[in-house]
Image (tube, rainbow, N blue to C red):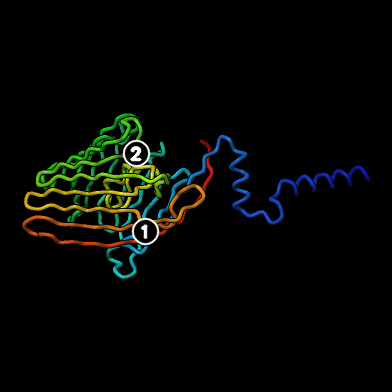
Amino acid sequence: MKNYALYLLFLCLAFIGCQKDIGETDADLTAKKDKKCNKCKVLYLPVNNIGHLLYDSIVFNYRDKYGNLNSIRTYNRTYPRANRGLDLIYDKNNKVSKVQLYPNTHFILVSYKADKIDKCEEYYINQLNDTIPNKRWTFTWNNEVLCKLKEFDFIQNSERIETFEYKSNTNASELLSIKLNELYYNELTSVLYSGKNYWAKDIKNKELLLITPFGFPNLILPVQKEISYSRFYRDYIFNARDRVTRLIEGDYNEAGFPTRVYYDDHDYYLGDFAPGDNDDWSATYKITYEKVIVNK
C-alpha cells in the first residue's frame, strides 16, 4: 500500500512538471515551445487591418494555420455599400480553384501548370443569368518568381502587361519595380524596404490576390520585407501622375512585424487636364496577428 501511495505521489509530481510554471504567461510558454521545436516555424497571420483609407477594417479568415486564406471582408460603417469581399474555394489537392467576389456576381476560375498558377479567367452573371467572360490573366514564372502578368479584357478587347523586376531573378523576397504597359498609358512602381517584415508576409497566394480588388496597389503586394518607400508614376497621353509614399514611423512585435505604421503620401498631377494639382494625405494602420507554430 505504501509503494502504491509513493507511485501516485511521483505520478502527480510528473504531471505538475509538465504544466506551465506558476506565474508563467502563455507567451512565455509559447516561446519555450518555440525553442524546443527545432523543426517548427512561427507564422504571424494578420487577422485585422485597421486604418485603410477606404475601409474601417479589413478582416482575414484562414483555412488552416499555414496561411491559406478562406476569405477577406471589408467593413465600412459610413458607407456599407462600399464593402467588398472574396471567398477562396479549394480543390482536393488544397489548391485554390475558384475565387468568388462580393458583392457582385463575378468569380474567377484558377488553373495550374507545374504547381504554379497558370491562367485565371473571370466571369460574371448578367441579368439573364448568362455567364459572360470578362477577363483572362496569364502568369509567367521563373522558378518561384512571378515575372510577368498579362491581362486580356474581353469587353474592351484590350491587353495590359505587368512586368516584375527583382533584386534576384530566383528570389521573390525583394521586388524592385513593377512596369505596366497599356494602350493609353504606362506605369512604373519602384519600392525600397526597411529591415522589418512585411505585414502580409505569411499570407499564401499573394500573387493570386493581385488580380482581385485586394491586390496591389490597394492592399497586398507579393513581397517579404516591409516597404519603406514607393513611387508610382503613370504616364498618360496628355498628363501624368506622380505618387510617393513614405513610411514615417512604426511599432513592431517581437518578430519584427508591424503592429502600427504611419505613412505619408504625396500625389502630384501634371499635364493639360490637371496642371499642378496636389493630393496629400497620411494614414495610420494598425494590424493584429494570430501567432501560430507549424512544422517546416
In the image, taking residue 122 as reference, residue 143 lies left or right, namely: right
- For the residue pair 104 and 253, the one nearer the viewer reads as 253
* Image vertical order of residue 195 relative to residue 25, above or below: above
Decide: few, some or many residues near mark 1? Use Cα within 10 Å; few <14, some 14-19, many ≥20.
some
The residue drawn where x is 84% and y is 46% is: 8
User: In this figure, which residue is indicated by the disc labeled 2?
Assistant: 174
* Image vertical order of residue 159 relative to residue 144, above or below: below
Tell me how far mark 2 sits from mark 1, CA to CA. 22 Å
The residue drawn where x is 12% and y is 46% is: 185
Decide: few, some or many residues near mark 2? Use Cα within 10 Å; few <14, some 14-19, many ≥20.
many
Q: Amino acid at mark 2?
A: Glu
Percent position (x, y) of residue 113? Answer: 30, 31
Work out whether residue 219 can be spotted: yes
In the image, taking residue 93 as reference, residue 209 lies left or right, namely: left
- For the residue pair 22 and 94, the one nearer the viewer reads as 22
Instruction: List the single residue furthest toward the right.
Output: 2
Tag 2's secondary structure? strand
- For the residue pair 34 and 225, the one nearer the viewer reads as 225
Query: Which quadrant of the structure image shows residue 6?
Result: top right
User: In this figure, which residue is indicated by the disc labeled 1?
Assistant: 262
In the image, taking residue 21 as reference, residue 241 lies left or right, namely: left
Number of callouts:
2
Query: Which quadrant of the structure image shows residue 203?
Result: top left
Q: Amino acid at mark 1?
A: Tyr
Percent position (x, y) of residue 282? Answer: 31, 61
Percent position (x, y) of residue 104? Answer: 25, 57
Percent position (x, y) of residue 71? Answer: 38, 52
Q: Earlier in the sequence, mark 2 or mark 1?
A: 2
